Image (cartoon, coloured by chain):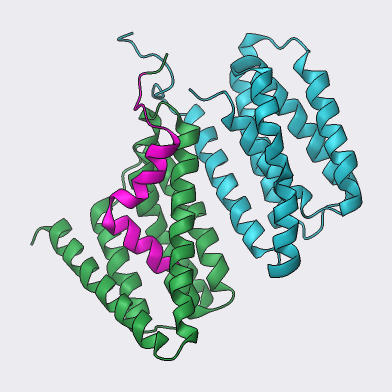
Amino acid sequence: MRGGAAPPALLFAALGLALAFAPRSSWTPSLLALLAALVAFTFLPVPRVWLEGIFLGCWISVIATAGSVHLFRRLTPYAALTLSINAGVWASGVARLSGSRLDLIETLPCVLIFFPASWVMSRHGSIPVMVVASWVIAVAVLAGSLQLLPVTPGYLPDHLE
Amino acid sequence: MSTGLPGGWVAGFIHPFSGIDHLLAMISVGLWGAFLGRPSIYVLPVIFPAMMVVGAILGMFAVPLPPVEVGIAFSVLVLGGCIALAIKAPFWAACLVVAVFAIFHGDAHGKELPSAADPVGYSAGFVLATGLLHISGIALGLLNARPNGVVATRSLGCLIAIWGAWFLYQAIGI
């Protein structure tokens, strides 16, 4: 099992951490853009052969979104919008090929991590949020690397089955 | 259908707690960071998981490394020793020491990852557990601000180093 709720949950959490570094005025437009991208791309047909590429794109998006926390001290509203649309595209792609729409609905609240993250930032600075972002990056790098392994991963049936 | 280990998040989360050598090393990273102060207190817990991922990838791809058990035992000994002796290493040196040891710890975790039926959950579990152990170490390091707190944390470092020496003795099998 590698699909389901985990990949969109990580992507939404990464987006939430990134939005904590964006101006408050950009939060609502970014959330609306995320919802619009999710709705639009969830209903688009995605060929099954794109499965590996969609997963890789999802993990790269998690790394880039959480990495923006380390690269930029402040996220511009346009960057926040771009990251939101990007998250919507890859999350809906993963859910479409290896999960369900219900997974998206269940994991969407993960993006709201920007509320506690911005609260922490206002009191203790950005470091705790950056540490959590580095954990998200670590998980995405591990999950993405597994795809490139020359062995049968545990989530696939092997030659005995 | 999956063929791997049934455990996902829970198995990954428990893994760092299942070996006292991993557990002591990760607590030591936070504790030593607290001793060194800024920026090590927050950079070391970022470097450790980052380099642990490098080690895990090396483990997944079966890249040969020096004996991992010796490296892990050595990490407990050295990190405990640094706390016990209150070594104020330069920032770059502390980063280098922690990065090298993280590769050994990551290798040990990463070798199990390909067989996990839920690798994302497994990774998330062990990265979170590692992070929480670092935070526990930093929390223990807050004792330094109290009267006799430094003596308490240095004594703890001494115990960790002794334990590390025992691990090393077992790993080398003298």
The chain whose colour is green is B
**Observer-nearest of A41 and B55:** A41
Quadrant (top left, top right, bottom left, bottom right) of the C terminus of chain B: bottom left
Front residue of this view, candidates A86 and B145:
B145
* Residue sitting at x 66%, y 32%: A107
Q: Residue at x 27, y 69 (%)?
A: B77
Quadrant the N terminus of chain B occupies: top left
Compared across the picture, whether B47 is left or right of A24 comes to left
Overall secondary structure of the magenta section = helix
In the rendered image of this protein, does residue B99 appear above or below residue A40? below
**Residue B163, image quadrant:** bottom left
As drawn, is B136 to the left or to the right of A90? left
Query: Measuring 25% from the left and 74% from the top, which residue is drawn there?
Result: B159
Could you say which is closer to the camera, residue B50 or residue B148? B148
Does B7 lie within the magenta span?
yes
> Is residue A60 among the parts visible in the rendering?
yes
Numbered circles on residues, count: 0
- Is residue B67 visible in this depiction of the protein? no
Is A128 covered by the magenta stretch? no
Question: Which region shows up in magenta?
Answer: B3-30
- Residue B170 is situated, as x and y percent measured from the top left of the image, at 14, 59
Supply the letter of whichever chain is cyan.
A
- Could you say where residue B9 lies in the image, as x and y percent from the top left? 45, 37
Corner quadrant of residue A9? top right
Is residue B79 rendered to the left or right of residue B164?
right
Q: Residue A62 appears at what percent x and percent y?
A: 65, 39
- Residue B146: % across, % down: 47, 87
